[in-house]
Image (cartoon, grey):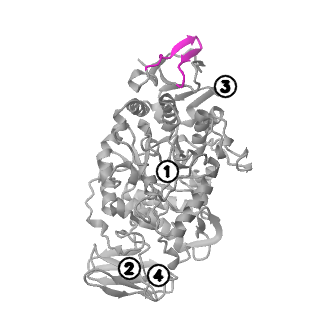
Amino acid sequence: MTEALWALQQGASVQPDGVKFSWWAPRLRNAKVVIEGDSPRTIDLNFSGDGQVSGFAEGLRAGEDYMLMLAGGRRIPDPVSRWQPHGVHGPSRVVDPSVFYWTDRPWRGLPLKDLLLYELHTGTFTPEGTFESIVPKLPYLRDLGITAVELMPVAEFPGGRNWGYDGVGLYAPQSTYGGPAGLRTLIDACHRSGLAVVLDVVYNHVGPEGNYLSEFGPFFTDAYRSPWGEAINFDGPDSDGVRRFFIDNALYWLTEFHIDALRLDAIHAIFDFGAHHILEELAAAVHAQAERLGRQAWVIAESDLNDPRVIRPRHLGGYGVDAQWSDDFHHSLLTALTGETRGYLGDYDGLPSMSKAIADGFVYHGQYSRYRRRRHGASSKDRPGEQFVVFTQNHDQIANTLQGVRLAGRLSPPQQKLAAAILLFSPFLPLLFMGQEYGETAAFHYFTDHGDPDLIEAVRKGRREEIGAFLAGEFVDPQDASTFALCKLNWDLPGQTPHAGILAWHRDCLALRKQEPCLSNCRKDLVKVNSGDGKWLTLERRDPSGSRALLVCNFSEDGLAVPMPSPGDAWTLRLWSGDARYGDALPEPSPGDDVTVRMAPFAAALYLAGAD
């Protein structure tokens, strides 16, 4: 017998003869639902002994607004609201998810190893800053060669500008982005274009403004502290309903919005010491629902733990999360390119760390970390490459490590292409941050639009403390509207020099990765990496089909003779970052002798074995 499909039972559910209201709310007392609009009325609620609260509004239809009225007359929004058109403090709106006409029925998702990710922030990706304004850019993204659009969090947050990690309406797509209809339109268009959609969700904390969850139940605990205050109560008294709330949220995005993967923010700030970890339960629930829907869906964690249990399958004692972000890769490559050693970057030594990251996954696998002042991590050598998402830039690393300055502001075009080659030809899942494919020069700072003056000052103070180790220049105020404006992409750059050449390099690298089995198989066990003197690196990729590739990289500002790892093989040059079509017209790599190849400064060359 096939298990029935999950459906959201909490919040406002449209029925043939009205709207059913239901919440797990053991703390709610004497509350009513107030229907607003032209025909206001009040709906009584039933309170059961198990914490369930329910009511029914006969004749109510989608599109009408409502709030919960507490004792004393105070009104708050629905914590499971599907739409907050008037912001985090305003009334909730009834939404009927069945009325949207999906055109993606043939879509079944993508295999994990085929995800080539592009992280974007909806508000700054286009001038309009909406879900629907992304749709005209999808042909560009498809032609670039990426296969998955990763959206930074879209749950309703206060104001009109925010990274999204201050979301409080966890079921409501941001109203200023276009609300639920706009998000569905974008996802449907992505699937028609052959692009998967990854949604960044935040289950380690809830934003400070407009957060009414404590009115409903014991959602937070002072047993643990996260960087954002009290932790989510995943393992304390009455935590079963809390766990259900967040698992339902994951299934909601998968089911009602056809999301292909969830990126879980900062799971190291999720605390659960029960026998059945919330991450394990959530991943299992997502996989089961995806199977019932006849689709592939994935769970990807952001983790600072270097703990392979996170991505180890459940039958091997792990949590069964499909993949995780790899900060070690980023930190190793950044130190190799810039020599930066501030903060946690001081734990990495450039190309030796880079070689370790490529060969094993985690650089720190149990050895002492000077930054942490303790041993850190465990070996991930047994985990396949598709379980690691790697990047040279992302929202956090630009805004935190580099004070908002993108790598294009610190690296020359040859260095940018060199970094892209390592990223895109690694045995992992590469992620590009919006605009880096053409060398975007706009900053990416942290920005907010809070309404509470005390909270605004607290955010400023917290921001200074968070980036203190990297704060070398003037502090950029996250609340200032100009900070947000500075982060908008410059869409006239891709056609200009040197940006057009950088873009062409990214396109050709992604195309070759898809074309050659050895470059797309994510077989970390079929990789051979060598580096020398902190100046050069070679990466050999193989595949059981016989496909072989060799990436040769010069990290020096001088020309170098780089040793070839297999001098007797017939390697044919396939891509060369200094080629005129990529904007540089540098000398082509040439044999130095029988066992070396002469490389120009900051250059990358990709060879194929036996290629014509």
Q: Nearer the viewer, residue 347 or 538?
A: 347
Can residue 416 be found in the magenta stretch? no
- Inter-mark Cα distance, 4 to 2: 18 Å
Q: Which residues are magenta?
A: 585-602
Residue reaching furthest to the top: 593
Kindly identify which residue carries mark 3: 533
Can you say whether 441 is above or below 302 in the image?
A: above
Query: Which residue is pictured at 30% across the width and 49% down the height?
Result: 135
Which marked residue is nearer to the observer: mark 2 or mark 1?
1
- Helix, strand or loop under label 3: loop
Kindly identify which residue carries mark 1: 445
The dot on residue 52 is: 4
Amino acid type of disc 3? Asp
> Do the residues under discs 3 and 1 have CB atoms within 8 angstroms?
no
Kindly identify which residue carries mark 2: 67
Amino acid type of disc 1? His
